Image (cartoon, grey):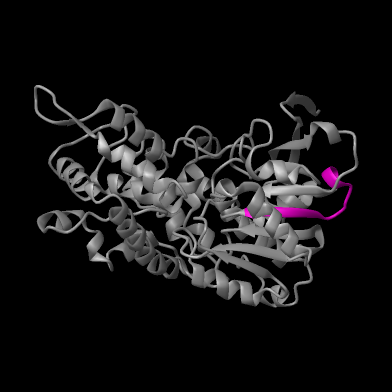
């Protein structure tokens, strides 16, 4: 059953689909997917081509837009848009600390979550496409991890694609998670240096907060244990277009005087817990490293192991000297499953996923080298989340793919640049520029 309703300028339709949990066992267990169809109000009765949007992540449901802001307004000029909650996210059979115990213990949960990577997501898309388009291929817009899924789509089911549009999401085709993080930490350090160059007063502010956390046990109102490593992970913000400014605003009023001495303010703690909690997207923490697994090597908490190769990120060493505290970001660590109440019950499940050695390839280099689908990608010049060199190497491996390399935007350029970014990429796909 579908339900349609209106928002300013658009008609929305809730769509639900049933797909196999394991596409290799089509008669086995099923899960439900949710997607929101969006069409411009003045074109609701028209036959239009389809654009499927694959959200970044992993672990995030599709954007809940009101009306047609940002890139959506540009897309609705010529498409019906399907905003898909990828399996395990949003309203698509959500996977979290509340639902996963229905699978059984940690071993059963880990086996279940191993089916929530890009390969399964692509097969979900192909399973629902005939019901949505009548069998016609669609344009796919993949942001970040959604771009990883789009490259997997080009590898396994290019017949389902009319056009592939990727923003900030060209993955390495063969890098292990260790390679990803060895490339990531120097990028993160550059972003931190740029933040401190813009806001030099934040050097001492960050050192003061970190020093306080080394000397005091701080538990946020939602039960999150705010350690110095957790505070450093707020550097995740530095990969977005406005992230440096938001981090500065967070740091500037962190302390208030109390009868017991200076303490982290309630306002700071409330903002920090909202930024740090994985309650709304636990799959990000659980399968963030498995999205890079493609062989018999375990990911084995790659970000944590590789961080040890970059001692400048050690907070205690930084505070013992006079250097700046380095933030981190776009990495998942085992301590998160101790600090975050939304993740604590899933610690053993995460350990089993980190030890897993039966990952299968996600990309087909030979098929990508023979690609015939019009494909374009925005590559951000110093993207904190996805390594630019890895992306450009992949771009060269996909026949006919055209890139727009720009330093005008950070990783979330499709949000910040909206209509202009999508307009340029669609024009490139049609050889209009």
Query: Looking at the image, which residue is at 47% across and 58% down?
Result: 385
User: In which quarter of the view is residue 226 placed?
Assistant: top left
Q: Is residue 264 left or right of residue 119?
A: left
Would residue 90 be counted in the magenta stretch?
no
Q: Quadrant of the C terminus?
A: bottom right
**Residue at 67% across, 47% down:** 21
Image quadrant where residue 13 sits? top right
User: How far from the left and from the top, in percent, is residue 101?
Assistant: 50, 36
Estimate the x, y position of residue 289 in percent, counting from the top left.
47, 58
Q: Quadrant of residue 79?
A: top right
Q: Quadrant of the N terminus?
A: top right
Q: Nearer the viewer, residue 141 or 145?
A: 141
Q: Position of residue 145 (x, y in %)?
A: 57, 55
> Does residue 198 lie above or below 398 as drawn?
above
How many labels, in total?
0
Residue drawn at 80 percent across, 47 percent down:
50
Closer to us: 254 or 198: 198
- Along the horizontal axis of the image, is 336 left or right of 123? left
Residue 140 magenta-highlighted: yes
Viewer-side residue, 276 vs 156:
276
> Which range is magenta?
131-142
For the question of whether residue 295 can be seen, the reply is no
């Amino acid at each position: 059953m579908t339900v349609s309703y209106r928002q300013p300028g658009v008609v929305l339709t809730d769509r639900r689909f049933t797909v196999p949990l394991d596409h290799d066992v089509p008669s086995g267990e099923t899960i439900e997917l949710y997607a929101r169809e969006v069409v411009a109000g003045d074109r609701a009765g028209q036959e239009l081509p389809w654009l499927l949007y694959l959200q970044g992540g992993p672990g995030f449901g599709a954007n809940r837009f009101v009306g047609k802001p940002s890139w959506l307004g540009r897309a609705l000029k010529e498409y019906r848009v399907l905003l898909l909650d990828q399996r395990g996210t949003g309203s698509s059979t959500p996977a979290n600390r509340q639902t996963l115990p229905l699978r059984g213990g940690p071993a059963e949960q880990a086996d279940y979550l191993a089916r929530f990577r890009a390969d399964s997501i692509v097969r979900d898309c192909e399973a629902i496409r005939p019901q949505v388009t009548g069998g016609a291929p669609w344009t796919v817009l993949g942001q970040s991890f959604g771009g990883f899924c789009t490259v997997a789509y080009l590898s396994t089911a290019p017949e389902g694609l009319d056009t592939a549009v990727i923003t900030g999401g060209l993955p390495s085709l063969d890098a292990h998670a260790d390679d990803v993080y060895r490339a990531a930490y120097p990028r993160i350090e550059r972003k931190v240096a740029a933040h401190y160059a813009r806001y030099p007063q934040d050097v001492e502010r960050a050192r003061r907060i970190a020093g306080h956390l080394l000397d005091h046990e701080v538990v946020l109102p939602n039960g999150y244990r705010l350690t110095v490593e957790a505070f450093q992970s707020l550097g995740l913000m530095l990969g977005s277009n406005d992230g440096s400014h938001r981090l500065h605003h967070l740091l500037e009023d962190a302390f208030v005087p109390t009868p017991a001495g200076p303490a982290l303010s309630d306002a700071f703690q409330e903002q920090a817990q909202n930024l740090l909690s994985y309650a709304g997207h636990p799959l990000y923490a659980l399968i963030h490293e498995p999205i890079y697994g493609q062989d018999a090597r375990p990911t084995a908490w790659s970000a944590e192991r590789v961080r040890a190769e970059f001692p400048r990120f050690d907070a205690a060493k930084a505070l013992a000297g006079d250097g700046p505290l380095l933030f981190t970001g776009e990495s998942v660590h085992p301590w998160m499953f101790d600090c975050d109440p939304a993740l604590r019950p899933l610690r053993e499940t995460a350990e089993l996923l980190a030890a897993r050695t039966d990952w299968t390839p996600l990309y087909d280099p030979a098929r990508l080298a023979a690609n015939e689908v019009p494909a374009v990608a925005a590559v951000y010049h110093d993207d904190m989340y996805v390594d630019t060199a890895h992306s450009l190497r992949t771009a060269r491996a996909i026949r006919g793919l055209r890139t727009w390399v720009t330093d005008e935007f950070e990783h979330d350029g499709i949000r910040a640049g909206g209509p202009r970014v999508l307009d340029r990429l669609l024009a490139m796909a049609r050889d209009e520029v």
